[in-house]
Image (cartoon, helix red, strand yellow):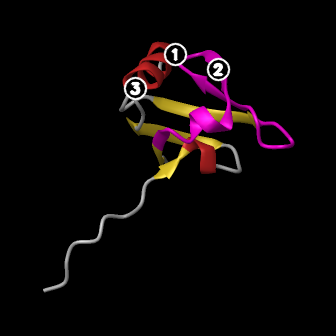
Amino acid sequence: MKPCMRTPMKTLGEIHHGGQLEVTAITSDCSRAGRLAALGFLPGRRIRVVHIAPLGDPISVEMEGQKISVRRTEASLIEITEVP
């Protein structure tokens, strides 16, 4: 039998275009995960990428009517799935 292979998750930091996304998890220590959760990045939350700076940092997203910008290092801690 072949072992089950887990599909690598994409992170917000890997996104290079706008679109609808859903947060699936935050992978970090408690303090950084807590800060991202306080900003509203919670599993199941839908976000939309509205702007990526020319050099890729920061990334601006819209979430429940609010625009939030995060650095690419923070965005790389947010696992996402694309939503059609």
Element under disc 1: helix
Between 36 and 41, the one lying in front of the other is: 36
- Pointers 1 and 2 in contact (CB under 8 A)? yes
- Kind of residue sitting beneath label 3: Leu
Q: Residue furthest bottom?
A: 1
Tell me if residue 34 comes above or below residue 16 in the rendering: above
Is residue 50 highlighted in magenta? no
On the rendered structure, is 17 left or right of 43? right
Is residue 59 highlighted in magenta? yes
Tell me residue 66's x, y (percent). Answer: 61, 15
Q: In the rendered image, which residue does mark 1 sit on?
A: 39
Residue at the spot 47% in from the left edge and 24% down from the top edge: 32
Determine which quarter of the picture holds residue 12: top right
Between 50 and 12, the one lying in front of the other is: 12
Tell me if residue 30 comes above or below residue 84 in the rendering: above
Q: In the rendered image, which residue does mark 2 sit on?
A: 68
Tell me residue 53's x, y (percent). Answer: 82, 37
Between 26 and 83, the one lying in front of the other is: 26
Q: In the rendered image, which residue does mark 3 sit on?
A: 42
Q: Residues within 10 Å of mark 2 (few under 14, many from 20)?
A: some
- Pointers 1 and 3 in contact (CB under 8 A)? no
Q: Residues within 10 Å of mark 1 (few under 14, many from 20)?
A: few
What's drawn in magenta, residue-wise?
52-79
On the rendered structure, is 18 left or right of 34? right
Determine which quarter of the picture holds residue 5: bottom left
Between 77 and 21, the one lying in front of the other is: 77
